[in-house]
Image: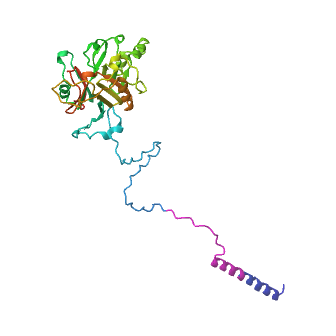
């Protein structure tokens, strides 16, 4: 290679090297070799504090590591507190009663306390007058009976009423009459007389300690007794609080009025009447019907002693059905018929009595 050729090659190589160096400088200067890679977020070892809330929020506990139990969340308070309503009556009637410790309220036709609510309705037509006391009680003990065991100890309704400090009192089954030789009688949870089941000749009525009231057709009872299905002992096992023996039962098992009764035909005609009705535990009714006889007792001012033809058993049963009762039972009537509410005496009250049923305050 000649000298001139060497010089030319050297110049060319130097030029090429300069071009390469210039290209690299431009590439780095303008970022031609940078990759389009997304920058990862910055993670702080300590989180930023959250804003302080205006309302305090209940802290939810953190579960202990290694345990499977889920922590309970705080329970929010209810807007309406649950009101306890003990007793035999359904809680739907709680508004009928006053708060505990409140003084009872009397009106001419009502009585209201923390345990008892009574509403007295009078029904008067051209030839008929009767009273229905609608009764709500929270305890079976609000239905209190009183009785004597000897004829000479009998008392008037007002005397029984005052003795028991009662709000309402009716006559019951005149338990010391000859019928007691073949009946069954329980008062306030205590048995005062029991004769053999086979001696029954009348329907009987049981109010149980849970407030349920049932009437028993004595023919059906004796048939079941003969089969070994029922007895006074099986009824006793259900804790009867009162057992009345007079009758007859006025409604059938479905709450419909009977038209045939287990009693003498002469008793079925129009008479003064006393009856007890049942709707549900704690809800009862007393019925007092004025009848076709004069009030001869001059010692008492009797309300409504005017003209009234009374009711037959068929009519009394129809009345109980129309009032929506589930069970109803006829008690002693005639001149025995009497009911006292507050200071007012209703009915006939021509005789002293051995037994009554009253509405009293619990513990009274």
Q: Which residue corresponds to the image point at 79% horizontal and 84% vertical from the top-left?
A: 9
The answer to which quarter of the image holds residue 283 is top left
Residue 54, given in percent of the width and then of the height, sits at: 37, 60
User: Farthest residue in the left direction?
Assistant: 299
The answer to which quarter of the image holds residue 3 is bottom right
User: Farthest residue in the bottom direction?
Assistant: 4
State the extent of the magenta-drawn residues as a range: 18-43
Q: Is residue 124 above or below residue 268?
A: below
Residue 341, given in percent of the width and then of the height, sits at: 23, 32
Quick one: 195 or 65, which is closer to the camera? Answer: 195
The C terminus lies in which quarter of the figure?
A: top left
Q: Which residue corresponds to the image point at 40% horizontal and 16% vertical from the top-left?
A: 221
Quick one: 24 or 170, which is closer to the camera? Answer: 170
Q: Is residue 41 above or below residue 270?
A: below
User: Farthest residue in the right direction?
Assistant: 1
Residue 191, given in percent of the width and then of the height, sits at: 28, 17
The N terminus lies in which quarter of the figure?
A: bottom right
Q: Which residue corresponds to the image point at 40% horizontal and 15% vertical from the top-left?
A: 219
The answer to which quarter of the image holds residue 37 is bottom right
Q: Which residue corresponds to the image point at 18% horizontal and 24% vertical from the top-left?
A: 297
Quick one: 119 or 8, which is closer to the camera? Answer: 119
In this picture, residue 18 sits left or right of residue 262: right
């Amino acid at each position: 290679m000649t000298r001139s050729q060497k010089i030319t090659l050297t110049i060319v190589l130097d030029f090429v090297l300069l071009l390469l160096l210039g290209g690299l400088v431009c590439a780095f200067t303008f970022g031609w070799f940078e990759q389009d890679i997304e920058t990862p977020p910055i993670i702080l070892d300590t989180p930023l504090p959250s804003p302080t809330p205006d309302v305090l929020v209940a802290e939810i506990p953190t579960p202990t590591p290694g345990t499977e139990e889920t922590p309970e969340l705080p329970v929010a308070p209810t807007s309406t507190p649950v009101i306890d309503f003990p007793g035999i009556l359904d809680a739907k009637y709680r508004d009928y009663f006053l708060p505990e410790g409140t003084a009872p309220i009397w009106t001419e036709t009502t009585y209201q306390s923390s345990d008892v609510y009574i509403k007295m309705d009078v029904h008067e037509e051209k030839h008929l007058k009767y009273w229905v006391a609608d009764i709500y009680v929270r305890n079976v003990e609000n239905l209190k009976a009183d009785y004597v065991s000897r004829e000479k100890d009998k008392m008037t309704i007002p005397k029984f009423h005052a003795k028991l400090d009662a709000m309402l009192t009716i006559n019951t089954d005149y338990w010391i009459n000859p019928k007691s030789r073949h009946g069954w009688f329980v008062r306030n949870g205590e048995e005062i007389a029991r004769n053999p089941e086979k001696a029954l000749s009348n329907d009987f009525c049981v109010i149980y300690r849970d407030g349920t009231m049932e009437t028993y057709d004595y023919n059906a009872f004796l048939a079941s007794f003969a089969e070994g299905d029922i007895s006074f002992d099986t009824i006793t096992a259900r804790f009867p609080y009162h057992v009345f023996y007079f009758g007859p039962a006025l409604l059938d098992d479905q709450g419909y009025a009977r038209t045939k009764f287990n009693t003498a035909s002469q008793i079925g005609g129009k008479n003064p009447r006393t009856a007890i009705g049942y709707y549900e535990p704690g809800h009862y009714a007393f019925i007092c019907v004025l009848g076709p006889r004069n009030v001869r007792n001059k010692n008492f001012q009797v309300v409504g002693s005017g003209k009234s033809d009374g009711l037959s058993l068929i009519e009394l049963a129809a009345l109980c059905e129309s009032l929506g009762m589930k069970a109803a039972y006829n008690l002693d009537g005639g001149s025995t018929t009497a009911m006292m509410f507050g200071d007012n005496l209703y009915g006939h009250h021509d005789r002293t009595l051995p037994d009554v049923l009253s509405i009293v305050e619990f513990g009274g």
